[in-house]
Amino acid sequence: MNEQIQEFKDLEKKTTGFLEKLTEPDLWISYGMVALKIIIIIILSTIIIRVGRAAISRIFKRRAKAPLQFSERREATLIKLLQNILTYSVYFIAIVMILSALTIDVTGILAGAGILGLAVGFGAQNLVKDIIGGFFIIFEDQFSVGDYVRIGTFEGTVDEIGLRTTKILNWTGELYIIPNGNINEVTNFSLHNSVAIVDVFLGYQADLKKVENMIGVLLETMPEKYEQIIGTPRVLGVQQLGASEIVLRVVAETLPLQNWFIARELRKAIKIKLDAHQVEVPYQRIVMMKGNDHQPGDHIGDRQGG
């Protein structure tokens, strides 16, 4: 009986002590400060995420006026990717700050995250390099889908741009898949106007002034026929003096990637014009020399008889 009474007194004492602690003002003030810190962290995190998302969307709206653009799907993907990166980063920092406010030691968590990141970095260096390279290719508008580019020894039309690889389709049908981390130098042929270059071969007997005037008149009519031509094509003059020909060079500014088509059309039109005025282009001739009809013995006999 005495033991039960003693247990009851101990329980009552513990309960009284617990209630006294709960009623201490300093305890509730400290709890209130922790709760206030957590609330402030959550509010600031929410504001940063919303402002950051809006800023990312506004940046892409401004870059819509840039000369290089990519598809809406790719732009939406990139916006979502950046927004997710921002959200996860802010959430991670907020969780660490909340745990720290709760007096939980976050040193072990940060050390574990650092070791995990280091392990992933060492194990997937090429993958990380490719992803970072692909991100900057898209973000900096180095090239876009549909552009005609040369990357190293590969040349063709960009078929697809991913965060890890870029696919280039050659005009003969080959599809090149290049890791973005290996892209060091890019030549983009789709940004500015191209130049069509046509060399006209003439014989040395041709009248250069007459031919240049004739071709010049023809070139003035070409912009009316082909909308791909910018300005009026012109004859630069004699480009080369060959063994049996004179080379005149004709140039025309065209829309991007239209120089090959316009060059073919210029060659065709110039050839028809030269034929109409009976201006021959040089070609190889074979001259056959016929020997003397007399036999060598006849000459010797004649000499001896003389």
Image (spheres, rainbow, N blue to C red):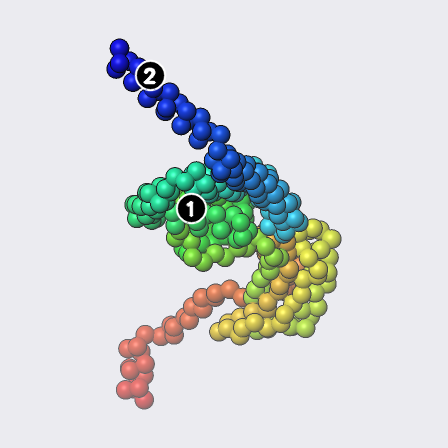
What is the three-letter code of the residue carrying label 2?
A: Phe
Q: Residue at x 53, y 74 (%)?
A: 241
Q: Position of residue 192 (x, y in %)?
A: 61, 57
Residue 212 in the image: state x and y as whole percent. 67, 69
In the image, residue 152 sits, relative to residue 88, either above or below, namely: below
Q: Mark 2 packing: few (<14 Cα in 10 Å), some, or many (20+)?
A: few
Instruction: Residue 8: give its label.
Output: 2
Q: Which of 116 and 77 is in front in this view?
A: 116
Helix, strand or loop under label 2: helix
CA separation, marks 1 and 2?
A: 68 Å
Residue shown at the point (41%, 70%) measured from the top left: 290
- Tell me if mark 1 has few (under 14), some (14-19) or many (20+) residues whose alpha carbon lies within 10 angstroms of its own: some
Residue at the far bottom: name it. Answer: 306
* Position of residue 17 in the picture relative to residue 299 (left or right): right
Among the 4 quarters of the image, the one containing residue 248: bottom right
Residue where numbered disc 1 is placed: 131
| Quarter of the figure with residue 217 | bottom right
| Residue at (63% x, 70% y) in the render | 236
Question: Is 192 rendered above or below residue 172?
Answer: below
Q: Taking 185 as reference, is 266 left or right?
A: right
Per the rendering, the mark at residue 103 is none
Tell me residue 182's x, y (percent). 39, 53
Report whether residue 172 is seen.
Answer: no
Residue 232, x across and y down, in percent: 70, 61
Choose between 71 and 140: the one closer to the eye: 140
Question: Which residue in the rendered view is the most extreme toward the front?
Answer: 2
Q: Is mark 1 on a helix, strand or loop?
A: helix
Quadrant placement of the C terminus: bottom left
Q: Which of 208 and 34 is in front in this view?
A: 34
